[in-house]
Amino acid sequence: MVEIKPEPWSDALLAEVDSAFATHAKSDTSRGLMAPAECVRSGVFCRVYRDGEPVAWYVLRGHKYAHGSEAEIALAHGRADFDLVADVLPLIELQCRAFDAIRIETCRPGLIKKLKRIGYGVDAVVLRKRGNHDSAS
């Protein structure tokens, strides 16, 4: 049985978030500009348990706009033997049913393919330039 429990933020929890992504540069959508703990401000930390054992966690943020609302999965992390998309995303979608949309930002091609297969679409592309920002030279 999979169960989700929110947890209150603490310094230890922020350290856990930073630690989980410290060695995962390939999944850092900011490409090093932000620490993982910065991505979760104002979010709700939810730990995922399978048969009473912690196997994953994610952070949800809610956004209200002039014409609707959006839930954002700001960060997610799980054990390699646990499929977050298959086992947790349907529960997150239920959790977010009051929102007009769910947003997931990723730079992982495999995850993009998985999400497209279940109805998620690419709505934007992020372009970033590093350095002195002078396009004329």
Image: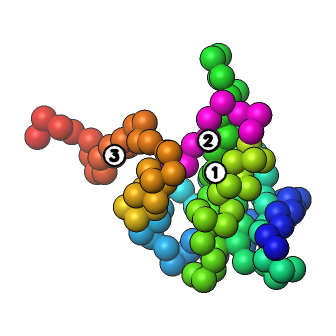
Residue at (40, 65) in percent of width and height: 110
Q: Which disc, if any, is residue 14?
A: none
Camera-side residue of 95 and 134: 95
Name the amino acid, label 2: Ile
- Quickly name the residue at label 3: 128
Residue 104 belongs to magenta span:
yes
* Label 1 SS: strand
**Residue 96's spot in the image, x, y percent?**
74, 42
Name the amino acid, label 3: Arg
**Residue 112's spot in the image, x, y percent?**
42, 56
Name the amino acid, label 1: Ile
Give the magenta part as a residue range. Answer: 97-106
Q: Quadrant of residue 20?
A: bottom right
Label 3–label 1 contact, CB within 8 A: no
Mark found first going from the N terminus, 3 or 1: 1
Label 2–label 1 contact, CB within 8 A: yes
Residue 91 belongs to magenta span:
no
Residue at (51, 78) in percent of width and height: 23
- Quickly name the residue at label 2: 102
Q: Quadrant of the N terminus?
A: bottom right
* Label 2 SS: strand
Residue at (71, 33) in percent of width and height: 99
Determine whether, in the image, residue 50 is placed left or right of residue 101: right
Q: Which disc, if any, is residue 73?
A: 1
Mark found first going from the N terminus, 2 or 1: 1
**Residue 48's spot in the image, x, y percent?**
77, 69
Q: On screen, 61 above or below 69?
A: below
Camera-side residue of 84 and 132: 84
Q: Quadrant of the C terminus?
A: top left
Q: Residues within 10 Å of mark 3 (few under 14, many from 20)?
A: few
